[in-house]
């Protein structure tokens, strides 16, 4: 039992955290609780955890997993999250195989919407991959924000974070970057995987292939899709397409004509005492300092 939540099965486990399904004892609502042992984390890890909670609490979007509450003890942090019963998009892609361009565009638009919202709010994810995209009630939700941070044009990041096969050339080669451009690259990798059922960069030469943006274009891809993939998986971040232009690209508009109109557009603190050592906090307020300290188709409705 954590606060008012009854812990159930483990549904995920990583290097630094465990995720358990849980039920709210009074309402019966299903949630996921990410459990982080603070005693096993470095000061830098804890700073990133603060940022993760801050960003996820600030972002309110139907395609982003919602953070409901943070519960903290002397040794652990418990992030109470929206539960996505459908599991990871990675498993669905492995089981389903490749999608048609029409199906892929419907799925991809949800991700583009989520990341555009993120960038407009002043944040970047920096770890977009199939494993971190979940399925809930027939929609996709971006579920992991462990490497999220703020961004601005005046300040560049230097951290090499993320998963190699989804990382942009600037991250792979340790070059400074602003932020949104690395998310666009990772989304390009996800789009390629939806279309082909495999990743564009793999094998022994993955680093050199990423650095040169060298990949095999799907032979049956439409001209609009080829252009979009080339524009997203572009080695030069200054020439890489923006998330707004991804959304209004010819390929997206082909399947979603309503996007065409966008081309003309401009762009409580409440602490409760439970009689235990647990402390409840609103991460957007109690951890607000983290921002200032930070460097810069259809899927199964289950």
Image (spheres, rainbow, N blue to C red):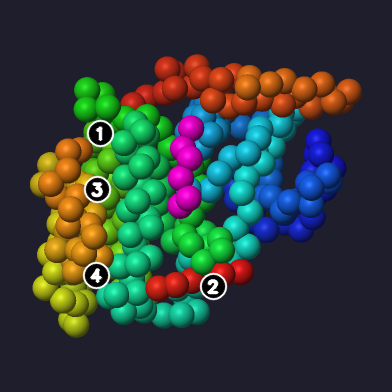
Q: Which residue matches tag 4? A: 255
Q: Nearer the viewer, mark 4 or mark 1?
A: 4
Residue 66, quarter of the rendered image: top right
Magenta part of the chain: 58-63
Distance Cα–Cα, label 2 vs label 4: 21 Å
Disc 4 on helix, strand or loop? helix
Residue 119 on the magenta span: no
What numbered label is drawn on residue 178?
A: 1
Residue 60 on the magenta span: yes
Q: Earlier in the sequence, mark 2 or mark 3?
A: 3
Q: Which residue matches tag 3? A: 243
Is label 4 in contact with label 1 (beta carbons under 8 Å)?
A: no
Residue in view at x 61 percent, y 49 percent = 82
Q: Quadrant of the C terminus?
A: bottom right
Q: Which residue matches tag 2? A: 300
Residue in view at x 37 percent, y 40 percent = 118
């Amino acid at each position: 039992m954590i606060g008012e939540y009854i812990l159930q099965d483990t549904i995920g486990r990583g290097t630094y955290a465990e995720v358990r399904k849980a039920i709210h004892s009074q309402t019966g609502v299903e949630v996921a609780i990410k459990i982080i042992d603070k005693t096993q984390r470095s000061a830098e890890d804890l700073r990133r955890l603060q940022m993760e909670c801050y960003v996820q609490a600030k972002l309110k979007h139907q395609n982003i997993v919602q953070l409901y509450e943070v519960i903290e003890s002397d040794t652990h942090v418990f992030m109470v999250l929206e539960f996505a019963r459908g599991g990871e998009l990675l498993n669905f892609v492995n089981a389903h195989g490749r999608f048609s361009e029409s199906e892929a565009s419907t799925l991809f638009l949800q991700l583009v919407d989520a990341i555009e919202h993120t960038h407009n709010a002043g944040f970047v994810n920096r770890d977009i991959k199939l494993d971190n995209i979940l399925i809930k009630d027939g929609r996709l939700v971006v579920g992991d924000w462990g490497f999220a941070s703020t961004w601005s044009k005046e300040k560049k990041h230097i951290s090499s974070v993320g998963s190699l096969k989804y990382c942009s050339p600037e991250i792979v080669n340790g070059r400074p970057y602003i932020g949104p451009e690395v998310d666009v690259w990772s989304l390009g990798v996800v789009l390629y995987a939806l279309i082909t059922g495999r990743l564009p960069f793999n094998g022994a030469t993955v680093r050199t292939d990423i650095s040169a943006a060298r990949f095999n274009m799907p032979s049956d891809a439409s001209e609009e899709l080829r252009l979009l993939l080339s524009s997203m998986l572009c080695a030069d971040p200054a020439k890489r397409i923006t998330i707004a232009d991804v959304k209004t690209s010819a390929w997206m508009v082909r399947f979603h004509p309503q996007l065409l109109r966008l081309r003309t557009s401009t762009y409580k603190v409440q602490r409760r005492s439970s009689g235990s050592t647990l402390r409840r906090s609103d991460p957007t307020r109690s951890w607000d300092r983290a921002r200032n300290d930070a460097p810069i188709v259809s899927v199964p409705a289950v």
